[in-house]
Image (cartoon, coloured by chain):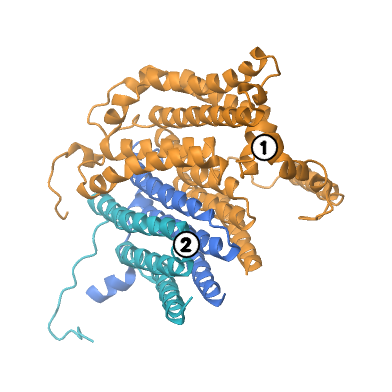
Amino acid sequence: MLALIDVVLLAFLAVTAVAIVRLRDLFAAVMVTGIFSLLSAGLFTVMDAVDVAFTEASVGAGISTILMLATLAVTQDVEKKRWRRRFSPLALGVVVVTGAALVYGTSDMPRYGDPDAPIHHYLAPHFLEHTPDEINEHIPNVVTAVLASYRGYDTFGETTVIFTAAVMVLMLLGGAATIDRRRPGGGRMGANVVLRASAKPLVPLILLFALYVQFHGDFGPGGGFQAGVIFAAGLVLYALVYGPDRAQAIFTGRRLEALVALGVLIYGGAGVAGIVLGGEFLDYDLLAADPQDGQHRGIFLVELGVGITVAAVMTTLFLLFTGRGQPAPWEDRVGESEGTP
Amino acid sequence: MSVWLEALSWLSMLAGSLVLLVTGLGVLTLPEYYSRLHATSITDTLGAALVLFGLAVQAGWSLATAKLVMVMLFLMITGPAASHALVKTAALHDLSLPPRRRQEDGDAGAD
Amino acid sequence: MTYFTVATLAILVSMAMLLVRAFKGETVYDRILAVNSFGTKTVLLIALMCFMTGRPDFIDLALVYALMNFISTIAVLRFTRYHDMLDDDDLRARRLSAPIAPAIEEELT
């Protein structure tokens, strides 16, 4: 049964990919990209990779679609027609040769899921077996242990990359001042009673769920990245329904910039604390009397840093990109009663 | 698990599956946007609720059931809200509602 | 477990039909509708897979999906009105105003 789901989902994925390439209307292409991400998450779930599916769900299906649409709103949304003939023998030749080389290269790799593959004999069993004694016996989620402790450098690099991207976008689009500029008319769907009524109880629950995902990452799927994105999605919902000016009342441009940096600071700080206490960078064993407690504290701190940075970055990007166009016509008629057209 | 509970779960999931099939069928074959919206808004929520209920009965009293109930509640709140937003946006701006059908004399109206 | 199989097959068939509508979609709203519905089916599929593989962790994933689907639909609906700054007016006009379906039109005349 799972094999059937695999095959069907992969077939959908292929068809969706072709459709994305062929569609000239970029808006439709973005919607279909949302479907692509939903399918990928389904596939990851079938492969039992729940943390990855979680991240794909939060980032691909939600934030990524929204940010791409926000970009479309400020550029044109139809792909330009090609100005020369479509078939190029040189391009085809390069693609065929490279593809053939790649396929030839993969023939040496072990088969998919082969238990004798080298990866299953070297690091993976070490992580699986030694997490209870090297890291902390109360962290059953090995993915979090690997991400935050065994491979803490990589995660630090990823967090810094997200931070750098946010800094670049802020520099390009005008920084905190752009976020803080009050837009006339608001730009909200708040005149719509149904949406307001359903979003009002949902937003605090979404934020609470984000915190649950953040702190539950030790025991189940979750962690800093996913929690940050879900938190940002809650804020996006609030901004969409009530208007960005109300969202910015709390999250002003300066505070967002500060939060973006704060997360990376916490992460780096945890690393430097290891040095200060006499060990190496990101050595969590020294953060408490008992090395296991130290590991737990270290993982908690770095996940917190990642969560803060990701939430702030996604919210910043959303607020920077949106509201730059004209307000929608229904927003001019704020307070108009809801009648049939 | 008792036979009654199994039967309830089986029935609920079967009904939910049929309703979900109707959703897809409706969206594909109905001629016009507002008709397709009819197909989605009711059947999505109902089918989801039935299937999730069947799964919850399977899980018994456990954390999984609580989470399934949360998912069900969430879908039941946001499904209709999303349908409302879809109709409102389309109707207010772009798509004209389909015109009323006029009854004419001698027209073979009611089938 | 046969009922999981039946439900999964039904969901997959429904997904296929929604995909066709998402690709064909005469108007942009049809596509948004199809994607929204597809998201709900994915939530159900994940919940089913959770039971088939026996791992209760997946339900968190289903919850996140339901959430993201909703937020993204609302966001998309909000952004469909920002296309006032297009160059390609003809494409926009074609996309946004759906013709009355010929079947209905026939019955009126």
Q: State the SS at label 2.
A: helix
Identify which amino acid the numbered label 1 is placed on: Val
Whole-percent x and y of residue B97? 23, 60
Q: Which chain is cyan?
A: B
Up-down relation of residue A325 to residue B90 (above or below): above
Q: Is label 1 in a helix, a strand or a loop? A: helix
Q: Chain of mark 1?
A: A
Q: Residue at x 18, y 84 (%)?
A: B107
Horizontal side of C56 relative to A177 (left or right) equals right
Residue at image x 54%, y 19%?
A265
Give left or right: position of A13 versus C79.
right
Question: Residue at 36% across / 23% down in the picture?
Answer: A179
Left or right: where does residue A123 sit relative to residue A258? Answer: right
| Residue at the outermost front position | A289
Specify the farthest residue to the top.
A276
Q: Which chain is orange?
A: A
Q: Which quarter shows the N terminus of chain C?
A: bottom right
Residue A280 lies in quadrant = top right
Q: Are marks 1 and 2 on the same chain?
A: no
Residue at the disc numbered 2: C44
10 Å neighbourhood of mark 1: few (<14), some, or many (≥20)?
A: some
Q: Nearer the viewer, residue A319 or C45?
A: C45
Disc 1 target residue:
A146
Q: Is residue C90 visible?
A: no
Q: Chain of mark 2?
A: C
Quadrant in which residue A181 is drawn = top left
Q: Residues within 10 Å of mark 2 (few under 14, many from 20)?
A: many
Question: What colour denotes chain C?
Answer: blue
Judging depth in this view, the residue of A138 and A106 nearest the camera is A138
Identify the disc placed on residue B52. none
Kindly report which numbered mark, 1 or 2, lies closer to the viewer in this rendering: 1
